Structure formats: structure tokens, C-alpha cells
Amino acid sequence: MKRNYGLLLTVIFALTLTACAGKKKEAPEPVQETAPVVTQTNNDPYGVGMSADQLRALGIAGNPLDYTTVYFEYNSSAIDRRSEVIATAHANELRRRGGAKVKLEGHADERGTRDYNLALGERRSQAVANLMSSVGAGNSSLQVVSFGEERPVDRAHNEAAWQKNRRVEILY
Amino acid sequence: MPLFSRSFLSFLLLLLLPMSAAQAQIEITSDGGVVRGIPTAIVPFKIVDGGSVEHQIDQIVAADLRASGKFDIIASNNYMSFPSRTDQVRFKDWRFIDAEALVIGEIWKLGGDNYELQFHVFDVAREQEIGTGKRIPNLRERDLRTAAHIVSDHIYTAFTGKPGAFNSRIAFMKRSEIEFQRFRHRLMVADWDGYGEQEVYASWRPLLSPSWSPDGSKIAFVAFSDGGSVIKVLELRTGQHKTIASFKGINSAPAWSPDGTQLAYSTSKDGSPDVYVYDTLTGQHRRVNTHYAIDTEPAWTIDGQNLLFTSSRTRKPQIYRTDLNGGATTRVTFEGEENANASFDYDGSRMVMVHEGGQIVVMDVESGELTWLTRSKFDESPSFSPNGDMVLYATEYGFEPALVVSSSDGRVRTRLEFISGDVREPAWSTLK
């Protein structure tokens, strides 16, 4: 399983490299001796199937592994593209480490009742856990916890604060 | 066992002095239109043979009666006389200021820490005493507050025919920052008006969802362990507590059955949050429903045969009702996008719940008609007083958390001034 993934990634990597090389050849660029800037030619620098520019478009600057919080819409546990990329990067990292323990801590904003939000927070952390195990993190190392609305990062009563509070924290 | 040291008490009293003005925190809302309470005069009780006492009986009684929404209290600066005994009452003095009910009384200081309280209640229009005068003997000074609540209950029953709720208790959660970003969470109990708060359980992790056993001896609540939320039951007399549900996943929203033998709650141990019932006699856990949506916040019907619960099965939370004997599950609320955290009053004729995420509404069960107690955005945790005439809930004044009691017709709101700090999750005891 693990080996298959590694192989697959290598193949993808190789293909993207050759694709880039092909493009380069078409361009009228006679100077060959200067070393190309590697990051520009690398379409998947962090193993999540996206280039740095594509990541930046999602609000991810640099390595998605440096991000440990993913966010949600109101009363929703749906994973958006940004969350998917971050969670995938962590799943890959877990697989690489082989059996590291991670706690997925789900939270909700203050709207809605506390017991409902406790359940909603769990839904969110469960959704992240499901995604991470589906891309190969291994379910046994993921602990799902919910604090509902009890531990907000921002106590203000506005959408900006609520956005920050509707989250799952990926804690190593 | 005194609740407070003497110095703290006098500090509290200092705080109380400007509070006769602060009692103006009681809002009379205009939602009720022409509906009004019984105009009531409460004469300051005469202290016989001894200067002063620490509790102002007339003010405590006035605050009690006013909060119920059934009485409007006439301020004492309008009074033309200040009788303390039956033979001193001149009814024309009270008709003149449009009083319909009159309360008078005396506090007898019998030496040492021994007091007796006497009081009389009058129907001004009929010019007669209601019942006969009452005596409450053998009081210590610190019992006078409780005695005042007994007076309130007596007056309340005399005019409404229903038992008063002024000797019932409330529970709530309080969060204090012990050092920077390090919080102590405490389960507190207090008199209905917030007086005499006392810590009964504490944790470094959040606490929520207190629920009183029907006999008032135990409180079930949600605490957090390393693995997540768990349900605990605390015995108030002994302080002993035990965990009754700590399944994998969340465990939350405990609610005692009317006979006090079972606890309904929500757990996600089998995947998604569903409602379960724990039998305190057998120790068995029984699943009540199975649905992929969030099912939580169970509440018992007064016959103990059905449960209300909050479910997100139509995506946004609404209230459903399920038959515990294997019958159907039906939707109960249809007005508004969101309804949650419902519970019944003492006779099951009305429900109180959180509407649209933060408004407290009372719903007449038969007609489905809603009465708005608040139109805020962030109010939560409503519960009825034992006699159904008041609703306790959590709100914010400015940015300050507060506990408020509203009359269940929405006419009068009373902020519980004795309680301050980061408070939430109030629950009214079912014990009268």
C-alpha cells in the first residue's frame, strides 16, 4: 500500500517534470547553462497535487503542512478545497512518520445551543478524520475530540470571529 | 456553616446599598400591551426591639413578586401610612394609591440570634385580610432571606392559586481566569434570585448542561476528560460524583426523567449523535433513536413516556418528539429556521426553547403559538421555574454575560444582580 503510493507519487512527479521540460523546449530560450529555479518548474512541491501558485490561490503560502487549522461554514461539516489540501498534507505526513498520533479537535462558533455545537464540533473533526484516513493516514492514529463552542479563539460577536471559531485543529 | 466570612458579607452589603437603585435593572417590557400585574403595596417590615437586620424583607418580597410578572409593586415613597399591625391598616390610604394587594409585617428580635417574622396580606378592594396572619418563628438572622421567600410564596399562592417558586434553586456554570489564559470552570448553585452562590464542582476544563434531579438532590452535567465530553452525576449533600457515560465520541445533554430514575442524553458512540436513556436502577443504556443527523438535547414529557429532542435531520435544528415505547417520531416545531433545546413547564402545556439561534420563545403546545421572551441573537439555556411562571436564561448585557429571569409572558425581565462574572448554562431546579 505504502509502496504503491510512493511509486504513484514518483510517477506523477516525473510526468510533471517532463511536461515542464517539454514546455521549456518549445520556448525560444537558448541559454541552457543557468540552473533553472526548481520551485517554478515543480508543479507539486508538497505532494498534494498542487503548485505553489495554486496553493496560494487557496490562501496557503508555502507548505500546507505548516497549517494546522481548517475552517467551516456555519452549521456545516463540509470540507472545502483548502481544508482538503491541508488535511491531505497532514495525512501524507502521518503516513511518512508511520503511526504518529494526532488529535483532531473540533470547534463551533457561539451561534446555536451548546450541546448542539458539541455535536457539530465532533462532526467537523470526524469529517477531517474521514478525509485523512481515506487518503491513507491510518485511522488508528487519529483521535477525534469536540469542544463545541466552549473554546473560541475569538470571543467577539461577529462573522469575522465566528469564521475563526468554526474550525478543526490538527494537533500533533 | 456560614457561606461567607463576615467581612465578605459586609462587603456584599456595601455593594447592596446602591442596589435599591440597581433594582431598576428590572425591565417592564411593553410586549404585554394592557396586561398588567396586581398593583401591590409592601410596607417595610417593622423591626420590633432592635435597630436593623441585614435583609430587607419588603425589598426581597417585592423583587420576588415583581419577577413573576403577576404583581406590579408600588414604590414605598407613595405610601400615606406605614402600618405593621392589622389594627393600623386604613384601607382608604391604599385605595388612594390604587393598591389592590397590601402586605404588612413585623420582625421580632427575641434576643441573641433568634428572630420571628409575622405578616398579613390584605385584599384592598374587599377591605379584608386574606386568610389569617402568619408567623415564621425560630429564625437566625441569616434565615431571614429564606423567610422573605416564604412570605413571597404565600402571597403568590393567595392571589394566583398556584405554588410559588421563590424557595427553589438554580444551578449555573461560572468560568474564572485564575492566571493568564488558565480557566477554572465551576458548577454553582444559588437561590432562585442568584443570592448565596456556592461552588459544588470544579474543573480545569469546560462544564456545561446542568440538569437537576426532580427531588433536587443531584445534578447531572457535562464535563471533559482526556477523551472528550462525559456525563457526570453529582450528589449535592455529599459532594460525591460519578461518571455515568464516557463512551467514545461525545456524551452530552443529560436530562432527568420526571420520576428521577432515568437520564436521557445524547452520545455518538455508535457513529452519529443519537438519544439514549440511562436507567439509574439497572445501570443499562438504551438507544432511543437512530439517525445519521445530530440528535441531542432530550427533554421528557411530564408523563415520562415521550422525549423531545433537537435534530438536524432537515439540516437546520428543529424540535422532534419520539415515543419511548417504540412509537413514531414527529416534528414539533415549524415556525422559524432553527429551534433547539426545548423543555416543558410543570404541566406540559408549554415548551420553552431557543429560536433562530438566540431568541428565547415559549410555545403553547396545543396551538403551537409562540411568545417571544427575547429577540436577541445570543440568548440560550432557557428553563422554566417549577410553577412555570418564570423562565431563566443566559444572555449578555453589553459584553458582560448575565443570567436573567423573564416572566413567562415576556412582560417583566429581572437580571440576577447577585451573580456576576463569566456565567452561562443556568438551570432551574424542578423542586418547589
Image (tube, rainbow, N blue to C red):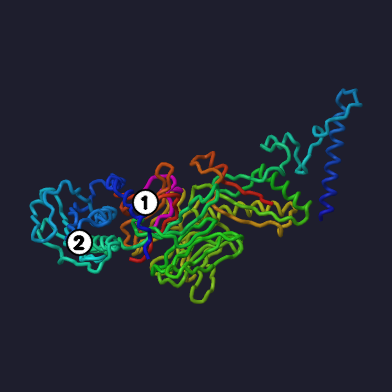
Q: Is residue B424 left or right of residue B408?
A: right
The secondary structure type at the circle numbered 2 is: strand
The secondary structure type at the circle numbered 1 is: strand
Residue B249, percent from left and from top: 60, 61
Q: Chain of mark 1?
A: B
Residue at the (25%, 53%) spot, across then down: B59
Magenta stretch, residue numbers: B356-383
**Displayed quadrant of residue A43:** top right
Q: Please name the residue that numbered disc 1 is placed on.
A: B404
- Looking at this view, is B345 or B168 the one in front? B168
- Farthest-out residue, right: A33
Circles 1, 2 touching at the beta carbon (< 8 Å): no
Q: Is residue B373 magenta?
A: yes
The C terminus of chain B, quarter of image? bottom left
> What kind of residue is marked 2?
Ile
Q: Is residue B416 visible?
A: no
Q: How many marks?
A: 2
The nearer-to-camera label among 1 and 2 is 2
Q: Is residue B212 above or below residue A78?
A: below
Q: Chain of mark 2?
A: B
Badge 1: how crowded within 10 Å, few (<14), some, or many (20+)?
many
Q: Please name the residue that numbered disc 2 is placed on.
A: B107
C-alpha distance separating marks 1 and 2: 30 Å
> What kind of residue is marked 1?
Val
- Looking at this view, is B378 or B74 the one in front? B74
The N terminus of chain B, quarter of image? bottom left
